[in-house]
């Protein structure tokens, strides 16, 4: 049974790690690799989806492969009371992949991709065109030191008492 308190157990952890390692794996093969019944795997996957642990089954798209090799993080300071307006404006920019509300100096942190630095400058100018955005601060990523990962987190989350 999937723990009800938002945690995962050892089987959930193994299931998720195996799904990450073999994204195109079927449920029958997944059950075979884990040594459990196919129905158990189906029930676990369904519960993990319902709890929001599994967000999707789509392919991971690498923007550089689409011609967007520049990755930047853009911090935004928003005019008081105009957050929704700023989010709407930013959401209209296709190169903005993610936006997070933050604490500290910036109000929002955006993950942005661009074809080149000139294109990045155009994207930032389009963001600044919104009267809701007062200021931006941009950091260009030069390399990926630790790529996106969840496997260590899965192991830690499945430990008793963790």
Image: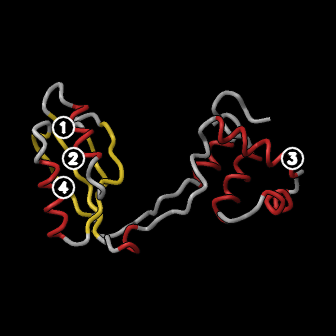
The residue indicated by pointer 2 is 75
* In contact (CB < 8 Å): disc 3 and disc 2: no
Cβ–Cβ under 8 Å for marks 4 and 2: yes
Mark toward the viewer: 3 or 4: 3
Label 4 to label 1, Cα distance in Å? 13 Å
How far apart in space, not on screen, are marks 3 and 2 (Cα)?
Answer: 46 Å
| In contact (CB < 8 Å): disc 2 and disc 1 | yes
3 or 2: mark nearer the eye? 3
The mark nearer the N terminus, 4 or 2, is 2
Residue 39's disc number: 3
Place of residue 124 in the rendered image (x, y in percent of width and height, measured from the top left)? 16, 55
C-alpha distance separating marks 2 and 1: 9 Å
Q: Quadrant of the C terminus?
A: top right
**Which residue is found at the position 18% from the left and 37% from the top?**
105
List the residue tagged with mark 4. 138
Structural crowding at the residue carrying mark 2, measured as other residues with C-alpha within 10 Å and reported as few (<14), some (14–19) or many (≥20):
many
Q: Position of residue 27 (x, y in %)?
A: 79, 57
First in sequence: mark 3 or mark 4?
3
Disc assigned to residue 105: 1
For the N terminus, which image quadrant? top right
Residue 157 in the image: above or below residue 18: above
Tag 1 near tag 3, CB within 8 Å: no
Where residue 106 sits: x, y (%)? 20, 39
Which residue corresponds to the image point at 13% horizontal and 62% vertical from the top-left?
Answer: 121
């Amino acid at each position: 049974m999937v723990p009800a308190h938002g945690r995962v157990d050892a089987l959930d952890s193994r299931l998720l790690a195996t799904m990450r390692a073999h994204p195109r794996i079927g449920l029958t093969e997944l059950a075979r690799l884990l040594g459990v019944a196919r129905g158990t795997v189906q029930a676990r996957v369904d519960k993990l989806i319902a709890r929001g642990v599994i967000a999707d089954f789509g392919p991971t798209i690498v923007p550089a492969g689409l011609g967007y090799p520049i990755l930047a993080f853009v911090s935004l300071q928003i005019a008081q009371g105009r957050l929704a307006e700023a989010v709407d404006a930013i959401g209209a920019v296709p190169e903005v992949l993610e936006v997070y509300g933050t604490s500290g100096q910036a109000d929002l942190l955006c993950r942005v991709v661009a074809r080149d630095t000139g294109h990045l400058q155009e994207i930032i100018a389009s963001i600044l065109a919104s009267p809701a955005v007062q200021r931006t601060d941009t950091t260009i990523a030069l390399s990926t030191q630790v790529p996106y990962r969840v496997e260590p987190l899965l192991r830690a989350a499945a430990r008793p008492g963790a």
